[in-house]
Amino acid sequence: MDRMLVVVFDNETKAYEGKKALGQLDNEGSISVYGYAVVAKNKDGSASIKQGDDVGPLGSLGGTALGSLIALFGPVGLAVGASAGFAGGASFDLLHAGVGDDFIDDVSKALTPGKVAVVAEIEEDWTTPVDTRMEAIGGAVYRRAHSDVTHQVHQENVAAMKADMAQLKAEHAQARADRKAKLETKINQLDSKIQDQLQKAKEKRQAAEAEAQAKAKILKAKAAAA
């Protein structure tokens, strides 16, 4: 199962041990790591990326669901070597992260100033390997299945706006001449919003497809190596 994983540690040293343990589990075949970052929570509430998977198969963290998840923990400041995607104005939102707000709340309460987390997107069949290894290091594990709910939400938004559009057109057909012009303006404005929603849904769908293809290549390469 594709999951978003956050493991919170008391300090940076422990976090790097956790990151190393994830790599070992990946090498053992217990999990597949698609991308990761070591993120520190600063005293002012911002987050700093201490280390990120810049050159991994998923590319820059900035345009991925993992990047969106990291950004939800606070304004992101770039450390040396961190992903340049965050500086490029990438769009972050809860929907792109593909997790619920309750998950974000739980992690935010644990990731207090001074603590450091390993944030990763992984594939795992069962939770014991990661939990056992991380608990031995002193990490608190939080995970959530990664579900791409963005497309569904956009569909619901568009459906609601189309219903409004139908109502406006019905009123337009029966309106007096002085009222028709105002209704036409509203119809045109609503149509622009619908087209904008459809374009955003298309872009996010394409991004999700690109990530899926990258993940498939990772799994294929591992299968060939095995």
Image (tube, rainbow, N blue to C red):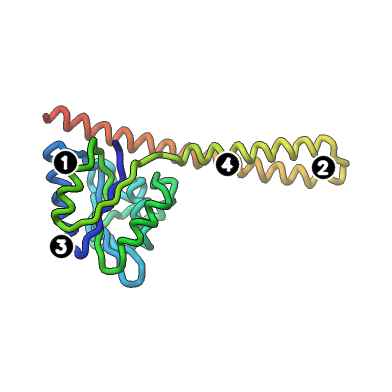
In primary-sequence order, the first of circles 4 and 2 is 4
Mark 3 and mark 2: span between their CA atoms? Answer: 68 Å
What is the CA distance from the residue labelled 1 to the residue labelled 4? 39 Å
Instruction: Of the two numbered discs 1 and 2 on the same chain, state the one appearing first in sequence.
Output: 1
Tally of numbered tags: 4
Query: Dot 3 corresponds to which residue?
Result: 13
Q: Earlier in the sequence, mark 1 or mark 4?
A: 1
| Image disc number at residue 130 | none
Three-letter code for the amino acid on which mark 1 is drawn: Asp
In the image, taking residue 45 as reference, residue 222 lies left or right, namely: left
Q: Identity of the amino acid at label 2?
A: Lys
Residue at far top of view: 224
> Left of 151 or right of it: where is 177?
right
Contact between labelled residues 4 and 1, with CB atoms less than 8 Å apart: no
Q: Residue at x 41, y 55 (%)?
A: 89
Residue linked to disc 2? 180
Q: Which residue is mark 1?
A: 26
Q: How far from the left and from the top, in percent, is residue 137?
A: 14, 56
Residues under labels 1 and 2: Cα distance? 64 Å
Q: Which mark is residue 157?
A: 4
Q: Position of residue 93 (x, y in %)?
A: 44, 51
Frontmost of labels 3 and 2 is 3
In percent of the image, x 14 and y 51: which residue is there?
Answer: 20
Residue drawn at (25%, 38%), measured in percent from left and top? 123
Calculate the distance from the C-alpha at mark 4 to the C-alpha at mark 2: 26 Å
Residue type beneath disc 3:
Thr
Query: Are there few (<14), some (14-19), or many (20+) residues within 10 Å of tag 3?
Result: few
Say whether marks 3 and 1 touch (CB < 8 Å). Answer: no
Q: CA distance from mark 4 to mark 3?
A: 45 Å
The correct choice, above or below, for 160 with respect to 105 in the image is above
Q: Is residue 67 above or below residue 180?
A: below
